[in-house]
Amino acid sequence: MNFKNLSTKELTGNIFTELHNDWMLISSGDEQKLNMMTASWGGFGVLWNKHVSFAFVRPQRYTLEFLEAHDYYSLSFFEPEYREELSLCGRKSGRDIDKIEATGFNPIFSSSAPYFKEASKVMICKKIYTDFIKPENFIDKKIIDFYPEHDYHKVYIGEIVEVLVKR
């Protein structure tokens, strides 16, 4: 395998740049069926004495069905040469196209969630909490403008159980 395991304490880089500017894929599923979507929103931190990720998925996204059906998901980060493939995974639905075929990505199933051979860094996360964002809880009411269709994200908090980086 061309990945090595790290602890979360060994991670380097600027996660804000990697997430917001470079994007990531949120993936879930199994060898029979998986889906992934591009995300530029999310977060990482410590909660309940665990290193966690925060992933946000709108209810109409196909990936939500996979996140609901499985206990684990992966967050895959890529080098800039994969920008076009990540863009496709954000624009197109897995309901309409085979994203694996369209991107040429090679899924790996050696962990609890699928990830991709082409990724430079992967976090495998175990779901520990989920809920929908509730509009009545916004203190800054201007944020509601992000939701003209009232399709509030579902948040997934996942314990980061494995970190893999390309060798």
Image (tube, rainbow, N blue to C red):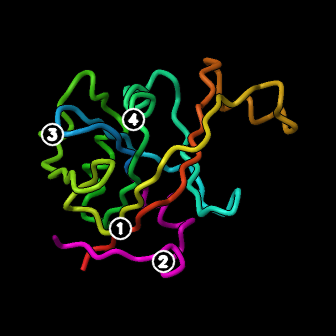
x and y, in percent, of residue 147 in the image: 65, 26
Q: Locate residue 55 relative to residue 39 in the image: left or right.
A: right
State the CA–CA distance, disc 2 to disc 3: 30 Å
Q: Which marked residue is nearer to the observer: mark 2 or mark 4?
A: 4
Instruction: Look at the image and give the residue range highlighted in magenta.
Output: 1-24
Q: Disc 1 or 3, which lies upstream in sequence? A: 3
Residue 11 lies within the magenta run: yes
Residue 145: image quadrant is top right
Element class at badge 1 = strand
In the rendered image, which residue does mark 4 sit on? Answer: 70
Residue 111: image quadrant is bottom left
Q: Nearer the viewer, residue 9 or 43?
A: 9
State the CA–CA distance, disc 2 to disc 4: 26 Å
Q: Which marked residue is nearer to the observer: mark 4 or mark 3?
A: 4
x and y, in percent, of residue 8 in the image: 51, 73
Element class at badge 2 = loop
Circle 4: is it few (<14), some (14-19), or many (20+) Cα within 10 Å?
some
In the rendered image, which residue does mark 2 sit on? Answer: 11
Q: Disc 2 or 1, which lies upstream in sequence? A: 2
State the CA–CA distance, disc 1 to disc 4: 21 Å
Residue at the spot x=54%, y=55% of the render?
A: 159
27 w.r.t. 50: above or below:
above
In the rendered image, which residue does mark 3 sit on? Answer: 102
Element class at badge 3 = helix
Residue type at the position of mark 2 = Leu
Element class at badge 4 = loop
